[in-house]
Image (cartoon, rainbow, N blue to C red):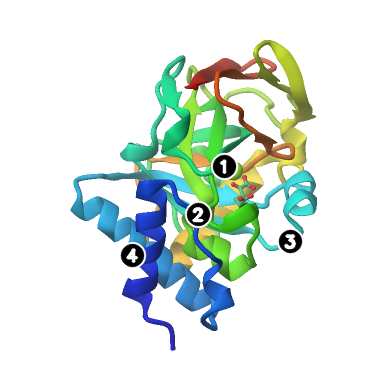
Amino acid sequence: MADIHTLAQRLDDAARSAKAIAQLSSSVRLTMEDAYAIQRASIQRRIARGERQVGMKMGFTSRAKMIQMGLSDMIWGRLTDGMLIEDGGVVPFNRYVHPRVEPEVAFLLKSKLVGTVTPLQALGCVEAIAPAIELIDSRYENFKFSLEDVVADNSSSSGFVTGGWHKPDFDFTNLGIVLSFNGAAVQVGSTAAILANPLRSLVAAARFAAQADEPLQPGWIVMAGGATAAEALRPGTWVECEIQQLGRTGFTIRA
Ligand code: OOG
Ligand code: MG
């Protein structure tokens, strides 16, 4: 049986020092239950240092992401205010091990959401939607992991930025997306790549929240998952995500 707290500390230390570690599964046998317990314990360490949970992220909700990472089950992670990147802000490269970015859609919740819900019920809990970028950074060497390893590592969650919020009173199921580095497109896609409708990611998030007994809270942000494959960041890059009808968001990663 894995020692949850020791493993959580190993991952938390790796994230804070931006030093990669070996996959946990190379030395211990982990179940998915262990993996989520480790994730929870590592986030509790952040909370104990004064961070606050501000939402949830979904992972592997598009074919592009599943194919890129060779994994095909949906996963989730916890977002804290310490991961928030200011829209148009600057972050230092050396805070991360081997950062990547991916274009996403973010939901801002206006009411509690948990359990088995329909897409329409999920939509009823959404205050607004925004274009977003997730900065993922695996704490494992070579950005390689099993499903249990990545879940324990908070599903690679490391940073996120959101643009302007829009009332969700229009059809956002198939909006064009461009992810660009220094103004040049590096990934193009559509919100339809996210489970054919990003609301389905929110439906899944509500189900996971019920399993974890941690309802999604009003004011929380839910990141729907990368719509395209992730792109590796190089120091000194201005990253931007533009989504049709939703506008843009971005940041610069400093050398
Ligand atoms: C795991 C996290 C996946 C997404 O949006 O699919 C994820 C990873 O690719 O490192 O964030
Ligand atoms: Mg993501």
Which residue in the protein does label 3 denote?
72
Which residue in the protein does label 1 denote?
98
Badge 4: residue crowd in 10 Å (few <14, some 14–19, many ≥20): some
Residue depicted at 40% across the width and 22% down the height: 86
Q: CA distance from mark 3 to mark 1?
A: 22 Å
Quick check: 204 above or below 9? above
Between 69 and 76, the residue placed more toward the observer is: 69
Q: Earlier in the sequence, mark 1 or mark 4?
A: 4
Quick check: 143 above or below 3? above
- Percent of width and height locating residue 16: 35, 48
Between 223 and 153, the residue placed more toward the observer is: 153
- Percent of width and height locating residue 193: 77, 39
- Of labels 4 and 3, the one closer to you: 4
Query: Does dot 1 land on a helix, a strand or a loop?
Result: loop
Which amino acid type corresponds to the residue marked 1 in the rendered image?
A: His
Q: CA distance from mark 2 to mark 3?
A: 24 Å
Which residue in the protein does label 4 denote?
9
Q: Are marks 2 and 1 in contact (CB under 8 Å)?
A: yes
Which amino acid type corresponds to the residue marked 4 in the rendered image?
A: Gln
Task: Name the mark on residue 20.
Answer: 2
Badge 3: residue crowd in 10 Å (few <14, some 14–19, many ≥20): some
